[in-house]
Image (tube, helix red, strand yellow):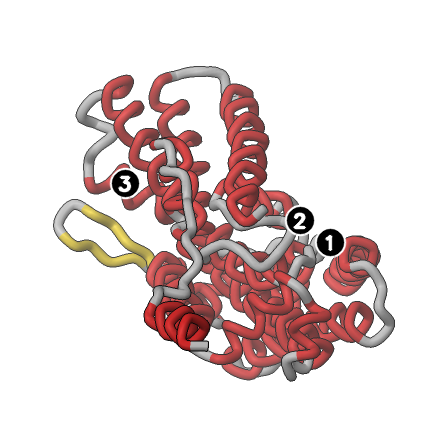
Amino acid sequence: MSGVQDFEKSLARSDNTVASFEPPRSPLKAFQHKLHGSPAAVPLIVLVLSLGLFAVLVGGKFFTAFSLTLILQQVAIVGIVGVAQTLVILTAGIDLSVGAIMVLSSVVMGAGVFRLGLPPELAVALGLVVGLACGVLNGLLIAKMKLPPFIVTLGTWQIILATNFLYSANETVRAQDIEQTAPLLQFFGQSFRIGGAVFTFGVVAMVLLVLVMWYVLNHTAWGRHLYAVGDDPDAAELSGVQVDKLLVTVYGLSGLICAFAGWALIGRLGSVSPTAGQFANIESITAVVIGGISLFGGRGSILGMMFGALIVGVFSLGLRLVGTDPQWTYLLIGVLIIGAVAIDQWIRKVST
């Protein structure tokens, strides 16, 4: 009996933890894990390498304050629309109507002043409401009727585009008329200098919007819920997230941001044109994909989207200064898109 007791005492004193063995990671695997934890790292690395490449090819004139801020001016509209597209894609959706919403909102702002005789402040507010309504419509069709985001936004893209041309009668409001009657519409096109750098209020708006949404996505419950819905909507709903309400909110906010981009577009062009910004949907998706945001939802950083937009801007200006055929820009951007998706697939294998 004493032998049994001695055995039990020795067993109680022994370490009952289970030994585990984790093989050491190779440098490539360790790098893969770091990229998985920092989704904006890849586009930032590509951006830095792109700047270095064109600094060598073009020389000193590429790295002037004016040239670098010119890139910011060129990507300001895409960056603002890209924020809207980022929110949607993080939920594993897509919005093909962002460009049409932007242009229709700008047309409504211009028509509010020159056709309806509204004060510029009310005309801008009306344009923002129109963008919000278009986004909420997308959200309701997707969340309540369970229709695929691609199909819904493909349909509303055509509807909004047709509404834009029918309402505007394909007429452009000239820059001179806006400058004399409603300079508020051109506010985001106004510029100021800091040394040799030239910034517009549109650039300032893009940077502030990206920073605000970065904080919201990373430091608020709403942002965590958005990532959760993009990663696994069923699990998010089981954990208490109101998935339908969040989707309507995301698409509504996307529409509102696109309307804001429409206001910035008037400042960028100086005029109101119903044919401007027709490729903003493709350009925003390009910035998002190159920026390392997963098209499968639930992973990515809004800072990466801004880096993606800047990469496109750097290639566009750099190749123009080199003197190459503009088609090379499209070719290289296409390569970047495919490469970004391939890298995203490789990084996602960390969790499998």
The image's mark for residue 275 is 2
Which element is circle 2 on?
Answer: loop
196 lies left or right of 103: left
Name the element at disc 3.
Answer: helix
Picture quadrant of residue 93 = bottom right
Among numbered discs 1 and 3, the one appearing first in the sequence: 3
Q: Which mark is residue 170?
A: 1
> Measuring 21% from the left and 21% from the top, which residue is drawn there?
59
The number of callouts visible is 3
Q: Residue furthest front?
A: 1
Crowdedness near tag 1: few (<14), some (14–19) or many (≥20) residues, C-alpha within 10 Å: few
> Which label's residue is closer to the chain start, 3 or 2?
3
Name the residue type under label 2: Thr
Circle 1 sits in a helix, a strand or a loop, which is it? Answer: loop
Residue at 33% x, 62% y: name it.
Answer: 204
163 left or right of 34 in image? right
